Amino acid sequence: MKKPVRIAVTGAAGAISSSLLFRVASGEMFGTDQPVILQLIEVPQAMELLRGLAMELEDCALPLLHTIRIFDNPEAGFKNAHYAILIGARPRTAGMERIDLLTANAEIFERQGKALSANAARDVKVLVVGNPANTNALIASRNAPDLSPTQFTALTRLDHNRTKGMVANHLGVNAEEVRQVIIWGNHSSTQYPDLHQSKIFGEALVGHQLDENFYRETLIPRIQNRGSEIINARGHSSAASAAQAIIDHMRDWAMGTEENELVSMAIVSDGSYGIEKGIVYSFPVRCRYGRYQIVNGLEINEFSRKMMAASEAELLEEKASVNHLLPKDTEQSHYKLRICLRSGKFLAADGLLDSGDPVLETSRLL
Ligand code: NAD
Ligand code: LMR
């Protein structure tokens, strides 16, 4: 059997985690031959609830669950973690926009960035789920001077999955037939679900099987506002579908994307597609060897360009509003990033390029 991996999860007693943890411990994230150590982190007042959840996990007698440990602080909870899933934050309730959460949640991610930098495994992979996820990921990354910005991502896979699901439903096909959808930008109502690269049974979608007006006027706003639609219906933000998206994001990052498919991940921009460097923006990526690479060279029409820019502008605004939480000494590493050299010469530089040496060099594009 493989050596266990350490997975730290914050907000571990919350709604998303309660859907997530049993599936992770069953092998749905990293495979049925990968034992896991769960390092579960909560605020002190939720420890009893977390203890109850840990007992339930124990009672499943899952063969892959090596150890469960519970923590009331991120410094101890992130110790030697190979994966960190940052869910813990105050969720949005009816009538609130994600931006309202910025002030409420920003300081959590400042502390957690520092704690990861000081305590996690050097190659830790971090996924931020707590909203506003993109800017929280930026705060965490900018507060982690000893890690690479490429180790920090935010969740837009839920939006990606929603897009596939809605298109499949509209056309009456299996969701797995809807390929190459892209979410650009922020996990918010400015996100841009781009179907111009998408194919069904190998055939282009927009303007063929999908009416362009329906796509622009009905489908895009529906996807952009799906989070609110769910909050209004359930009285709580999405939980089980968020857990599914977390599993998909982490599995693909660690184990690779499917052949001829791309996925959406919010990552620190390296300037690809003209998106300002140093913000956490959702791009189309492919993953191999535990790294991701932006899919470059896609044709962007005028409509797409406008939609992408609107979400970029929102992220720049969010960034400006948390500027006091972004230390100067990590600015350079976030601006000098090269996630994928356009020549395709490097698979993925690991971000901190001062030495000039990329960690992994290959002539293969993904
Ligand atoms: P929840 O309220 O059910 O659970 C959140 C948990 O986080 C609580 O148990 C709380 O005690 C804990 N927590 C709060 N601050 C913490 C901290 N500093 N350290 C550790 N734990 C902390 O909420 P939920 O439904 O699980 O949602 C969690 C977050 O995920 C929210 O911000 C929500 O908006 C966001 N979300 C994001 C996506 C996405 O796609 N990116 C989707 C759905 C929800
Ligand atoms: C979602 O997309 O379901 C959530 O991010 C909604 C929210 O704002 O919490």
Image (cartoon, rainbow, N blue to C red):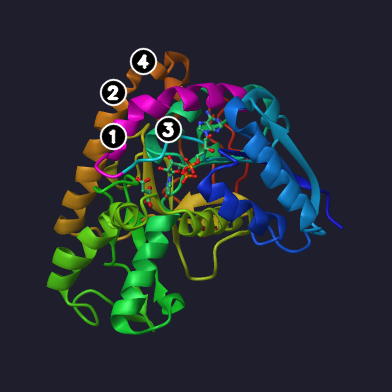
- 238 or 2: which is nearer to us? 238
Q: Which residues are magenta?
A: 94-116
Is the C-beta separation of discs 2 and 1 under 8 Å?
yes
Please name the residue that numbered disc 2 is placed on. 321
- Secondary structure at badge 2 equals helix
Mark toward the start of the polypeptide (1 vs 3): 1
Q: Is mark 2 within 8 Å of ligand 1?
A: no
Local crowd at mark 1 within 10 Å, few (<14), some, or many (≥20)? some
Q: Amino acid at mark 4?
A: His
Q: Amino acid at mark 3?
A: Asn
Please name the residue that numbered disc 3 is placed on. 136
Q: Please provide percent x and percent y for residue 362.
A: 59, 51
Mark toward the start of the polypeptide (3 vs 4): 3
Looking at the image, which residue is at 82% across and 59% down?
A: 63
**Distance from the alpha carbon under mark 4 to that under mark 2:** 8 Å
What is the number of the mark on residue 99?
1
Left or right: residue 274 compared with residue 250: left
- Secondary structure at badge 3 equals helix
